[in-house]
Image: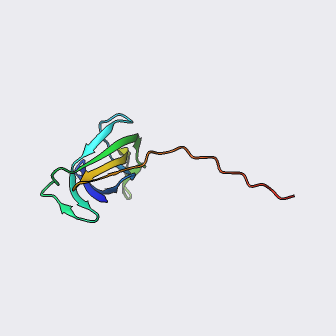
């Protein structure tokens, strides 16, 4: 099952356990956030007008980060005129934990710690 959600004026296609990077949300790391659902897909499809009634997508804030630096450089030739300006967007990484709607609920499996790989015995 997947859903199309709206976050900060943009639309994202998500499934359970996806990690998406969106524009900055005012939320602490580890807090739970609910997004409005525009469309649900899977075995049956539901399209909202504008939102799907009774459908929710829940996500957990993983980290607050910043994007790559974008440089805007303007130069006017032969006039000793140039301007350099940089910009870095504030971003939020969100892990989708649950999608529910149309009588179905899909939950993401909790992240488990990596088990150490078994060491191969060397034949002598």
Write down the quadrant of residue 30 in the picture: top left
Question: Going 13% across and 55% down the picture, which residue do you hit?
Answer: 50
> Is residue 78 among the parts visible in the rendering?
yes
Residue 71 in the image, given as x and y percentages of width and height: 40, 51
What residue occupies the far right of the structure in this picture? 124
Colour mode?
Answer: rainbow
Residue drawn at point x = 44 percent, y = 45 percent = 110
The extreme left residue here reads 49
Q: How many marks?
A: 0
Query: What residue is drawn where x is 57% and y is 46%?
Result: 114
Residue 22 is situated, as x and y percent measured from the top left of the image, at 33, 49
Nearer to me, 24 or 43: 43
Q: Is residue 105 left or right of residue 52?
A: right
Image quadrant assignment for residue 31:
top left
Residue 76, quarter of picture: bottom left
- Asked if residue 77 is positioned above or below residue 7 in the image, the reply reads below
Residue 80 visible in the picture:
no
* Side of 105 where 121 appears, left or right: right
Between 46 and 70, the residue placed more toward the observer is 46
In the picture as drawn, the residue positioned furthest to the top comes out as 28
Q: Quadrant of the C terminus?
A: bottom right
Instruction: Please state, as top left, top right, bottom left or bottom right, where the N terminus lies in the image.
Output: bottom left
- The x, y position of residue 91, in whole percent, is 36, 44
Residue closer to the observer: 88 or 31: 31
Q: Residue furthest front?
A: 103
The percent position of residue 118, horizontal first and vertical second, equals 68, 51
């Amino acid at each position: 099952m997947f859903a199309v959600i709206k976050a900060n004026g943009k639309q994202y296609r998500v499934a359970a356990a996806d990690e998406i990077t969106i524009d900055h949300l005012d939320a602490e790391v580890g807090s739970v956030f609910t997004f409005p659902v525009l469309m649900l897909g899977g075995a049956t499809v539901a399209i909202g007008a504008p939102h799907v009634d009774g459908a929710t997508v829940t996500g957990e804030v993983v980290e607050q980060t910043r994007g790559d630096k974008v440089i805007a450089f303007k130069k006017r030739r032969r006039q000793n005129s140039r301007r350099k300006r940089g910009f870095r967007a504030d971003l939020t990484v969100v892990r989708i934990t649950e999608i529910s709607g149309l009588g179905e609920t899909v939950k993401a499996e909790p992240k488990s710690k990596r088990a150490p790989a078994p060491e191969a015995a060397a034949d002598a």
